Amino acid sequence: MYPVLRKILFNLDPERAHRLASGAARLAQTVTPFAVDSAFSFAHPSLHTEIFGQHFTNPIGLAAGFDKNAVLLPFWKNIGFGFVEVGSVTANRSRGNKRPRAFRLPDDEAIINRMGLNNQGAERIVRRIRRYSSMPAFPVGVNLAKTHDAGIEGEAAVEDFCKSFRLLAPFADYITLNISCPNTAKGRTFEDPNALDDLLTAIDREKQELHRRIPVLVKFSPPITDKFVLDSLIDELIMVSLAHGASGFVATNTASDRQHLTSDQMLVESIGAGGLSGPPIESRSTRLVRYLYRKTEGKLPIIGVGGVCSAETAYAKIKAGASLVQLYTGLVYHGPGLVRQIKKGLVDLLAEDGHSAIGKAVGEDA
Ligand SMILES: Cc1cc2nc3c(=O)[nH]c(=O)nc-3n(C[C@H](O)[C@H](O)[C@H](O)COP(=O)(O)O)c2cc1C
């Protein structure tokens, strides 16, 4: 059924298609939640896992950016995701960049976007998350970013992040600090060791004020090079994160460059700036997962994201060291049935390798 729906959706501008699909999902989650649930359900004990002291019924999650405003949480659970990361949420509401700002590259099953952190703002979004914070066995992570406003910089940028943290951390199962958004080029980036140090120092203070323990993860960009030797910037960012007791990492965000594309070059050039996602970044993201796993000797959970569109690509991330896996672009090209397909395939792959539980495969190829 999705191939037919996809044809209709792909005739529309990607953002309109996203709005239409989200509207249909919203209807489904209120009108026919049980029908959706049974059509997509697949559970298996080998997929259960325990991360950050929380139970996940399966390791496949929705990546940040798809449900920025947390409007579809029951729907994601009903189509079989094991968890979801909402956001990026910023302290102030933001309309994002001018349209058009999302583009498909069908020949590569990829997307280029420069959404620019459009979202309804922390105060509005927290009200929705509160309502679902007790949804059983369905961890909800919240991805935070700095408000897309170049005028907010220095200490104000750190305070902007902290404001969102104060509002959302009491109700989130984990927090991801999005320091790697490629679409806010005019704003200050926190993918700089000193800036990250300032940010994490402030977040440490916020954590002490909080009356509960909250895992805080840091989300990185994919490495520029495909070679295993990574630049020292990554090492510095890892060191700073570890010095502040980060609970884990999310690897990776979209890529700013245009490597590994087969699409018509004129088409790619006509799109202009933006973050590339989907299969063209798959191997680089997996490489960073492996690098992080080795650097941290497998002690910290890693969420692997980038180009996951099959059980095999999800399993590759897990074997490289990811305890959990997320996807975004794969969902656009393959539809909601992909989640069930990946889970079923993972059960088979685990059995082939003689593993009784997903946790046993984590880092096997690191
Ligand atoms: C249209 C779009 C919007 C995104 N928005 C965000 C965002 O707001 N925050 C964030 O951390 N990542 C965002 N991402 C990045 C994804 O979370 C993910 O890291 C990246 O797309 C790689 O995964 P994929 O290849 O499965 O899409 C966005 C991706 C896309 C395609």
Image: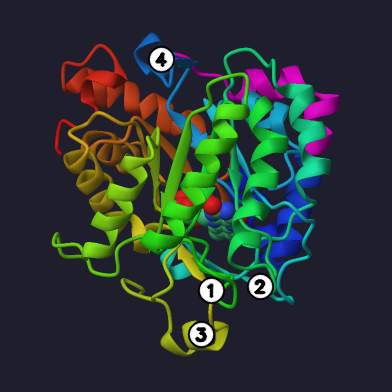
Magenta range is: 26-43
Amino acid type, label 3? Leu
- Return the x and y of residue 159 as percentages of the image width and height: 65, 53
The residue under label 2 is: 101
Disc with the residue nearer the chain's start (3 vs 4): 4
Amino acid type, label 1? Gly
- Between disc 3 and disc 2, the foreground one is 2
Frontmost residue, 23 versus 168: 168
Q: Is residue 39 magenta?
A: yes
- Per the image, label 3 sits on a secondary structure element best described as helix
- Return the x and y of residue 63 as percentages of the image width and height: 53, 44
Q: Are marks 2 and 1 in contact (CB under 8 Å)?
A: yes
- Return the x and y of residue 34 as percentages of the image width and height: 73, 17
**117 to 218, vertically: above or below:** below
The residue under label 4 is: 48
Q: Are marks 4 and 2 in contact (CB under 8 Å)?
A: no
Frontmost residue, 216 versus 28: 216
What residue sits 14% from the left and 59% below the top?
A: 228
What's the mark number on residue 274?
1
**318 to 49, vertically: above or below:** below
Amino acid type, label 4? His
Q: Relative to residue 40, is residue 346 drawn left or right?
A: left
